[in-house]
Image (spheres, rainbow, N blue to C red):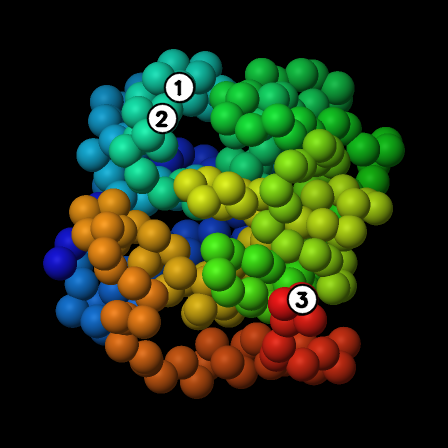
Amino acid sequence: MIVKCAWMYHDIMDLYGDKGNIMTLTKRAKERGIEFQVTTVGIGQQADLSDFDLVFMGGGADKEQAVLIPDLLSRKENIQKALDENTFFLLICGGYQLFGQYYETADHEKIEGLKFADYYTATGKAKSRCIGNIIIDARLDDQTLRLVGFENHGGQTQNVAHPLGKVVHGYGNSFDAGYEGYYDGHILGTYLHGPLLPKNGQLADFILTKAIQKRNPDFTFDKLASIDQPWEEIARKALLDRWKLQDKPEIS
Ligand code: GLN
């Protein structure tokens, strides 16, 4: 079995270890005998995103977001095709912001988004950023997961119709949102760097499953053999222990 992943703007959208997400997916696929093939897609590089099972984009500073946006907008039709053909999109922070209506930078420059969702991201109060460790309880199709990570964003994302989860510790979509990220079955956008997947093995397997399902619609989560993840568990427990939290979501 093979999973084809496009890693968009790998050279400029990679904050706080976002590339660890790609490393985690590669490792977890390999341990199940699945080939995880990664193709980087930079500015100006030709690629048909609908050929891929998974598209990943990390976070970046305002400057990088402004630099890449003409290229990203030029791919809008192709991204729509990919979504229609069940390619799964995993977007972190700056990548997540650019799939909404717009992103307003710290200097109040408005960057037009792809508009695949109704949410928009406005500038927060001057010099204020949502920074720190974050823990959320996420709902993903028929399962709930407690996710841990790290966030660092100035943008305040509003009008999120389907948040990924409820904030247990930290900020999330904005200083007072109480909710974090976006999930609609095809696009998962989140402010969690940290990086996200090494500390959240179940989420990594959920995303692997979504990607596999593009070519194998009957594939289910339980068909992935369980794997030992002692270091991942230690990393996650260290964070949960800090706030005396259980490794169990409190939403049903
Ligand atoms: N530049 C964006 C912001 O500050 C995204 C930052 C990020 O990806 N961490 O909100």
CA gap, disc 2 to disc 3? Answer: 32 Å
Residue denoted by label 2: 79
- x, y percent for residue 187: 46, 40
Circle 3 sits in a helix, a strand or a loop, which is it? loop
Mark 2 vs 1: CB contact within 8 A: yes
Q: Name the residue under label 1.
A: 76
Q: Is residue 31 above or below residue 110?
A: below
Secondary structure, mark 1, is helix
Q: Residue 65, can we see it? A: no
Q: Judge: label 2 CB < 8 Å from ligand 1.
A: no
Q: Where is residue 47 in the image (x, y as percent from the top left)?
A: 23, 27
Residue type at numbered disc 1: Lys
Could you say where residue 182 lies in the image, as x and y percent from the top left?
A: 58, 43
Query: Residue drawn at (59%, 50%), measured in percent from left and top?
Result: 164
Q: Mark 3 points at which residue?
A: 251
Q: Which amino acid does label 2 sit on?
A: Ile
Q: What residue type is labelled 3?
A: Ile
